Each structure stands twice: as C-alpha cells, then as structure tokens.
Image: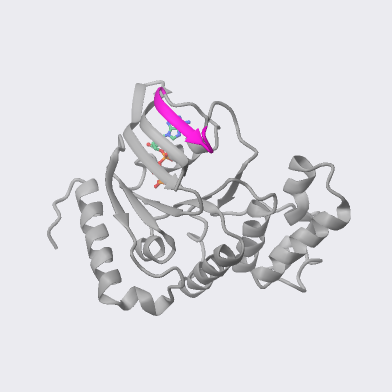
Amino acid sequence: MTNLIEIKGVRHAYRTKAGPLPVLDGLDVSVPEGEFCAVVGPSGCGKSTLTRLVAGLMMPDEGEVWLHGERVKSPRSTVGMAFQNPVMLEWRTILENVILPLEIVAPRMSRAKRVERAMALLELVGLAGFENKRPSQLSGGMRQRASLCRAIVHKPDVLIMDEPFGALDNFTREDLWQTMRDLRAKEPFTCVLITHDLRESVFLGDQVVVLSGRPARTQHILTVDLPADRTLDSLYTKEAQDMLHLLRDQIRIAQGRDGGH
Ligand SMILES: Nc1ncnc2c1ncn2[C@@H]1O[C@H](COP(=O)(O)OP(=O)(O)OP(=O)(O)O)[C@@H](O)[C@H]1O
C-alpha cells in the first residue's frame, strides 16, 4: 500500500518574542491511502501544528511532508478540514454551506451536480430534510454532521479533523463516531484526527500515533487491530481495553509521569 501522507524527521520551532519555541522535534508519521490515523498527546504538545504542516499552511524548519507523492510546499485545496467549532455561514442554508468548497475548487461543475453531491452526503449523515435550514436552526451535533459533509464534498485527498467532537456531549459524540464509521464505508477517505479522547482514537483509528510532550516526537504507534465495522460494544472487548490501557500509559509517559497505574 502506498503512503498518502509521509511525514519524515520534521522539526519546527515558533519564533516568539521570548525566543524560539521548539514544538516538533523528530516527527515521523506515515498514513497509507484510505487509512484513519488518530493523533493523541498531551495538551499543547504540537498536534495542531502537525495538521497545519499537512495542510501546507506552514513549512517545517527541518524534515519533509509528502502528500500523494508530492512534497508539500504551499496550501492544499486537496485537504478538507473540520474543527471543534464548525464555522457555518448563517446567511446560507445548510445545503449552500455544504456546496461552498465545490464553488471554489470545482467552479465548472454544474449547479445540479453540486446539489446532487451535497444532498447524497447529507443523506448519508442523516440530515436529509434539513438542507434548507439555517445553521442556527440545527443542534451542535447536526452542525458538526453538516461540517463533515462540507469537509469532504470536494473529495479531498485527506480529511484533517482537529478535535471535531470535543464540544459535544458524550452520547452525541458516540453517534458521530458511528456516522464517521458508516461514512467511511460508503465514501472512503484518508483521515488524520486530532483528539484528546482515547476511546475515540481506538473506535475510529486504524493507527493511533502518540506524541510526546513538547517538543513533540513520535513516541508510540499503536495499530488498532479491531474489525472495520466495529461497534461501541467493541470498545468493551479485552483487546480494546488492553489498547486503552496501553495508550493511557503512553500518555502518562508523554506527560512526564511514569507508566504505572
Ligand atoms: N503561531 C504560533 N506562534 C507561537 N507559538 C505558537 C503558535 N501556534 C502554536 N504555538 C504554541 O506551540 C505549542 C503547540 O501548539 P499546538 O496548538 O500545535 O498544540 P496542541 O497539541 O494542538 O494543543 P492542544 O492540545 O492544547 O490543542 C503551544 O505551546 C502553543 O502555544
């Protein structure tokens, strides 16, 4: 399998008034095409910085980022992004919000084709019938579903999600995990998910990358050996519980505490 994302030996420091702030210090991550990579690590270790590098929004001081066999040197329209607080345009309907990336990336696509594509996605995430509502008329979970559709409507090479479910209550969050699972089965995409939720990383990830404390390096990579059609119950199996324990220990180590319980 070819790697869609290849991050090799990346080092980066932000220039601040107080001097350089080293944030990444030897980051190596490979994500094969179609895989879901969850990234966890202590708060402030550099996870969002990693997403900016993959999206081409900034260049690392050292090392390389490759996307689809091309060195990333500028912002990419082939990257879809979803964040904790989806920014939806209130003066547009949900349908018009989802269509927006197509207007920018595929200006020659007909209006009918855009609507067809957006409606198919809205249906997949359970929002059929809400396409003519305004963002404020939807719940937080529904807005996040719409934001997911918007992030993949133009079939990006990679979907980057930075804490997309962080602001939702537990039940809504678990619903969204299942939506993501079903969406991936019908509409495969490569994904990098930044999360603080270890259960989320195991439910959704094919691999979980644990970053060390700042400056972050790749501390541990866990291959999630659970079936693709995993259910919430899968999280209560011994395999999943063992993985969660291992990740918990790795986070303790990353936080500078020992791995004991
Ligand atoms: N543009 C910037 N200039 C200077 N420092 C920055 C900049 N962006 C981020 N930082 C700092 O770099 C460090 C890493 O930030 P980043 O947002 O990548 O971490 P994170 O792991 O995503 O954090 P969190 O888990 O809290 O969301 C933090 O200390 C942050 O304050």
Answer whether residue 62 is magenta in the image.
yes
Q: How is the image coloured?
A: one colour
- Between residues 56 and 3, which one lies in front from this camera angle? 3
Q: Residue at x 48, y 72 (%)?
A: 174
Quadrant containing ligand 1: top left
* 158 left or right, relative to 19: right
Direction front: furthest residue: 1
Seen in the picture, residue 205 relative to 77 is either above or below; the reply is: below
Q: Quadrant of the C terminus?
A: bottom left
In the rendered image, which quarter is residue 128 located in?
bottom right
Q: Residue at x 52, y 67 (%)?
A: 181
Any part of residue 90 in sight: no
User: What count of labels does the image hold?
Assistant: 0
Q: Residue 256, image x and y in percent?
A: 19, 45
Direction bottom: furthest residue: 233
Q: Residue 87, image x and y in percent?
A: 65, 51
Dominant secondary structure of the residues highlighted in magenta in the image: strand
* 162 left or right, relative to 85: left
Seen in the picture, residue 131 relative to 222 is either above or below; the reply is: below
- Between residues 157 and 253, which one lies in front from this camera angle? 157
Q: Residue at x 41, y 64 (%)?
A: 200
Answer whether residue 154 is magenta in the image.
no
Q: Residue at x 28, y 65 (%)?
A: 244
Q: Which residues are magenta?
A: 61-69
Seen in the picture, residue 83 relative to 136 is either above or below; the reply is: above
Q: Residue 59, image x and y in percent?
A: 48, 26
Q: Residue 88, image x and y in percent?
A: 69, 53
